[in-house]
Amino acid sequence: MKLLERILKYQIITSLCVLTLGAILFYFSVDYLIDREVNKELMRSKSKVSWQLRHIDELPVYILQLGDSLQLDQVRYPGQMVLVERKLFNEFENEYQPYRQLIFYERVEGGWYRVTISKLLAQRKQLLEAVVMTVTFIVALLLVSLLVLNSWLSRRLWRPFYKTLRALDSYEVEKHEVLTFPKQHTVEFEQLNQSVTQFTDRLAATYQNLKEFTENASHEIQTPLAVILSKIEGLFQDESLKESQLVALSEISEAANRLAKLNQALLLLTKIENRQFLAGTEPISLVPIINRKLRDLEDLIEQREITVKTDIEPTGPVMHPALAEVLVNNLLTNAIRYNVNGGTIDIMLNAGKLVVRNTGAPIHIDPELMFERFRKEGTHSASLGLGLALAKTICQVNGQTLTYETDGPWHILTVTW
Amino acid sequence: MKLLLIEDEKALATSIQNYFQRENFICEWAADYRTAVEKINIYRYDCVLVDLMLPDGDGLDAVRELKRTFPETGIIIISAKNSLDDRITGLNLGSDDYLTKPFHLSELNARVQAVIRRRSFQGSQQIRFGKIQIDPQEHLVLVDQQEIVLTRKEYDLLVYLIANKNRVLTKESIAEHLWGDDADLMDNFDFIYTHIKNLRKKLMDKGCPDYLKSIYGVGYKFSEQ
């Protein structure tokens, strides 16, 4: 639920409670006031009637207010003055209506008279209706204005907030970007934006440092490795070495070579992640790359008696040619390395899609896990375990997707763009 | 043959120098940019090996300088930087080859020889070893004036072996020379053995003595003894 909607929810609940309570209070207070006023008027009428009866002995027609009625009855004994409420038939309205009657006794020329002043009461029902109507109207007005205010707020006041939110949503640390925003008048939003800017700034700097460190470290490792390898090669030429020493040296050499390869692969991976290979704008055709690679790998394919079937159209994604080369290379060498002797490789290249599938031993883990670095199924000691991780990273950086599926004996790698 | 090595890492420079001295090359060494430029301006070299990252300058400037003074000198860039941009800039400036560190000295040796061969006069472009004669331009291999037909890989292997004659060559360096980055696709080195065996057979069929010696556990050596 949006913040504004939540606020609105509480606002509505509160207003409804307050307005209901207010309406009840209003009803009773108005009722009470009217009641008091009626009584006061009755008393005033009583004084007028008494005075008239005592002094003038004749009641003028318009002594009372409109709608009130006066009744004089001769009685033998006076009684107590009472104030009663009863329903009387109103001929004018042709229905029973509530009246308040003040009954008192007055002595005129030795005889007692009972004086009854009846006053039509405003109907409670009508009052209640009026109050409910008014309150409902106020509630409706309030709700409408709240909604309007709310949408206006979200459109105007909250706009920078949503802008910041969207920017954060699409933020990718790999792009090394620092989020900056125009200055805001709202203090909180300005603070938020400043925090986000500082935060992403630090993040980008840290990420950059880390990547640079990795790259520099890999670079620095190359030189000592070159020294090691050159010294080993120099030693090989020493004819005084015994066979066992030569074998040990050869093993050192193999390990150092492997280290050098690993380092180069990691360096390449870091560079790709660092986006040092920017894609052009034109799609590049993968056909010449595939053909060249197949020619390079010809004798390996022949030696393992692998059948290669191709179904390729001149098409390809938008990417740096060097990366396309690495991608194709890694997919094809992967298809050869993990193939079975006498197996098959199918290469299909159509618009928006490159599929490389090969026969191979079944794998016992989720194929997608094969994209993890240093993940190897089985013991292919010569493999660095970085080939598919590199391919995946290349696709990620360029906005293509790479999937790995298995189907019976088939291992299917698909690049889509 | 006279080489200049521009490299700030002393240990590596000594290895390279020793390697080329065995080849009877004169290999001079400049540890920084200033010395390098001095030497380039005074002496004439057949080939210059340049490291791009020098403590007091950019190796690419040395390449420019060299192109200005002695444009016919062969240039090989040896760098820890494997960036495509540097490679392209280097080659555009007129360097003949680009080798990324770490590399096999035997590979460097083969490349230096190829550069010198390309840059020298027509006659000396021929490669000779014992009874073998190779015309690199025609990819023609003759043994006692009879042509032998080699596959592309066998031809590359033979040229590489001759370039590094009388030296022990490791299987990795041969694999890397022949298959480059795909060398690690070979789960074992039987594959090289197949090529070596075929090459040896083809050479011996034409009356070549067995120049190829296998060094147990290490690799091979190509020599006349």
Image (tube, rainbow, N blue to C red):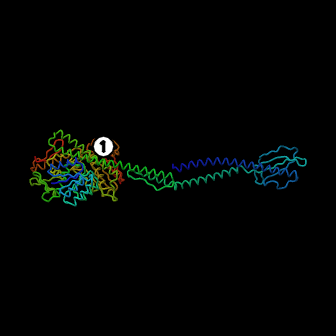
What quarter of the picture does the C terminus of chain A occupy? Answer: bottom left
Look at 10% across and 54% down and name the residue there.
Answer: B146
Q: Is residue B186 visible?
A: yes
**Picture coordinates of residue A248 (x, y %)?**
20, 40
| Of B111 and A334, the residue lying toward us | B111
Q: Can residue A334 be seen in this view?
A: no
Q: Quadrant of residue B66?
A: bottom left
Look at 52% across and 56% down and name the residue there.
Answer: A156
- Host chain of mark 1: A
In the rendered structure, which amino acid carries the disc numbered 1?
Lys
| Of A310 and A82, the residue lying toward us | A82
Left or right: A303 with respect to A396?
Answer: left
Q: What element carries label 1?
A: loop
From the image, tell me which residue sits under label 1. Answer: A376
User: Which residue is at the far right?
Assistant: A110
Left or right: A148 with respect to B2?
Answer: right
Left or right: A166 with respect to A7?
Answer: left
| Of B112 and A120, the residue lying toward us | B112
Local crowd size for mark 1, using a 10 Å CA cut-off: few (<14), some (14–19), many (≥20):
some
Q: In this view, does A244 lie above or below A68?
A: above
Image label count: 1
**Picture coordinates of residue A353 (x, y %)?**
34, 54
**Picture coordinates of residue A143 (x, y %)?**
59, 52
Q: Is residue B132 above or below residue A254?
A: below
**Picture coordinates of residue A318 (x, y %)?**
34, 57
| Of A7 and A362, the residue lying toward us | A7
